[in-house]
Image (spheres, rainbow, N blue to C red):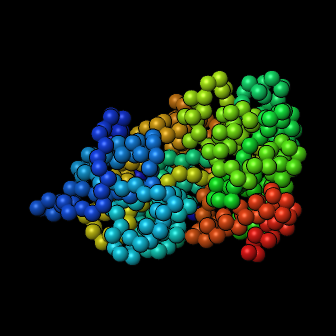
């Protein structure tokens, strides 16, 4: 999908306001004071799933700051992530959608296909300068429906002290990964930990191995996908990874790494705050190993996109567009990235961020090639994701060899 024209920044005032401490306001739904006597929009409703800290406070302050710039108050509601889509679909049918809606980027296709979102081009917004995968994820049927200020993905974390003591360098290829994981496995410590759980997290963790090997979600039972799954199976069968990976979410993987039960792990930068608080832990971050030297590492695009629902109120939609534009400005991309250990989605801004926060450089390097999970299948992605993690589970638990496990999952 082609990249589009740039989102122009109105002022840097939003960045100044974003960095200043702001008091929290009560979250709310309906809005009886949305306009004054002249009909001017005075408040906007926002819906997201940022229930946990620090995200809750970071985005409350960011949205309030942008609201101040636009001249509106923000009435924000946060709902549990696993119930957001069902709520949005219900709101769409009852015509009670918020003015601004945050979506996990792989969910945008489904919601845009339902007709619930307005194309951002209608408000003069576009996405020039953004990483291609970011644009792909927020585009449906040729129209841009969302803007994403920051992104994340996964990489290889390693315990620097353990690798140094073992004389092992961070692996860059699959063969090096198997060799390093075996050498680092000792006593109660495994060489590597990853999440092979039967949820979207399991699929998310498997995608870099699948995609970097030329595999695709359009043909789940392919030799390329099976070869990638064989790598995971080999790591478990050899004892370099725990059999418990089939039940570990990414938070569990992080716990194992922090506790010294794994010398390496596959995880994302949202874990950095807790890792930084772990006494005596020195860790490094590197790209996920690729099949052969010289191959390109392809990782999935994470993060959330901000959209403008079809509410039928043009004045409110125009004001909402100004808030979304503010939230995704260069300055606010940098501020949000620094506060949340994420990466700006504009490639030039990401490069600046890497210089300012060296520990995130490995993630910055991956941004230009991050791939949208919905890039191939659009709103059909969730079904494919389910089949992928089902096949992974079957193979890791010994129910079938990788190719047969993926065939069973693909055929339902």
Residue 94 lies left or right of residue 285; in this view the side is: left
95 vs 121, nearest the viewer: 95
Q: Quadrant of the C terminus?
A: bottom right
Provide residue 176's location: percent of width, then percent of height.
85, 39
Outermost residue, left side: 37
Q: Residue at x 79, y 38 (%)?
A: 190
On the image, which quarter does residue 99 sit in? bottom left
138 vs 196, nearest the viewer: 196
Residue 381 lies left or right of residue 97; in this view the side is: right
Provide residue 168's location: percent of width, then percent of height.
82, 29
Q: Residue at x 80, y 35 (%)?
A: 188
258 vs 55, nearest the viewer: 258
On the image, which quarter does residue 358 sit in? top right
Q: In this figure, what is the number of numbered marks?
A: 0
On the image, which quarter does residue 155 sit in? top right
Provide residue 254's location: percent of width, then percent of height.
65, 40
The answer to whether residue 274 is above or below residue 223 is above
The answer to whether residue 366 is above or below residue 317 is above
Q: Quadrant of the N terminus?
A: bottom right
Provide residue 193's location: percent of width, then percent of height.
74, 43
């Amino acid at each position: 999908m082609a990249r589009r024209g740039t989102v122009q920044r109105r002022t840097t005032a939003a960045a100044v306001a974003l960095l200043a401490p702001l008091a929290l306001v009560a979250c709310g739904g309906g809005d009886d004071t949305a306009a004054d006597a002249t009909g001017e929009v005075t408040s906007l409703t926002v819906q997201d799933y940022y229930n946990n800290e620090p995200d809750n406070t970071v985005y409350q302050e960011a949205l309030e700051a942008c609201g101040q710039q636009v001249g509106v108050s923000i009435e924000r509601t946060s709902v549990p992530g696993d119930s957001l889509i069902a709520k949005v679909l219900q709101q769409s049918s009852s015509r009670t959608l918020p003015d601004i809606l945050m979506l996990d980027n792989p969910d945008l296709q489904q919601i845009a296909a339902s007709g619930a979102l307005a194309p951002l081009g209608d408000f003069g917004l576009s996405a020039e300068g953004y990483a291609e995968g970011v644009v792909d994820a927020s585009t449906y049927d040729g129209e841009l429906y969302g803007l994403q200020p920051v992104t994340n993905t996964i990489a290889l974390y390693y315990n620097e002290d353990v690798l140094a003591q073992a004389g092992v360098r961070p692996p860059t290829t699959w063969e090096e990964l198997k060799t390093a994981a075996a050498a680092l496995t000792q006593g109660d410590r495994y060489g590597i930990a990853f999440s092979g759980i039967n949820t979207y997290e399991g699929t998310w963790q498997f995608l870099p191995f699948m995609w970097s090997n030329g595999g695709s979600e359009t043909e789940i039972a392919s030799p390329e996908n099976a070869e990638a799954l064989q790598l995971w199976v080999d790591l478990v069968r050899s004892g370099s990874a725990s059999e418990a990976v089939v039940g570990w979410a990414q938070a569990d993987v992080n716990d194992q790494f922090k506790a010294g039960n794994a010398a390496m792990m596959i995880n994302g930068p949202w874990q950095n705050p807790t890792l930084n608080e772990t006494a005596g832990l020195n860790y490094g971050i590197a790209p996920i190993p690729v099949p052969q030297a010289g191959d390109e590492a392809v990782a999935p695009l994470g993060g959330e996109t901000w959209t403008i629902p079809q509410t039928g109120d043009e004045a409110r939609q125009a004001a909402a567009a100004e808030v979304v534009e503010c939230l995704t400005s260069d300055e606010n991309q940098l501020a949000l990235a620094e506060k949340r250990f994420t990466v700006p989605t504009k490639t030039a801004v990401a490069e600046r961020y890497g210089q300012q926060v060296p520990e995130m450089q490995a993630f910055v390097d991956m941004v230009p090639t991050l791939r949208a999970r919905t890039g191939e299948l659009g709103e059909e992605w969730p079904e494919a994701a389910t089949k992928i993690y089902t096949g992974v589970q079957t193979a890791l638990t010994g129910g079938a060899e990788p190719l047969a496990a993926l065939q069973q999952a693909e055929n339902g």
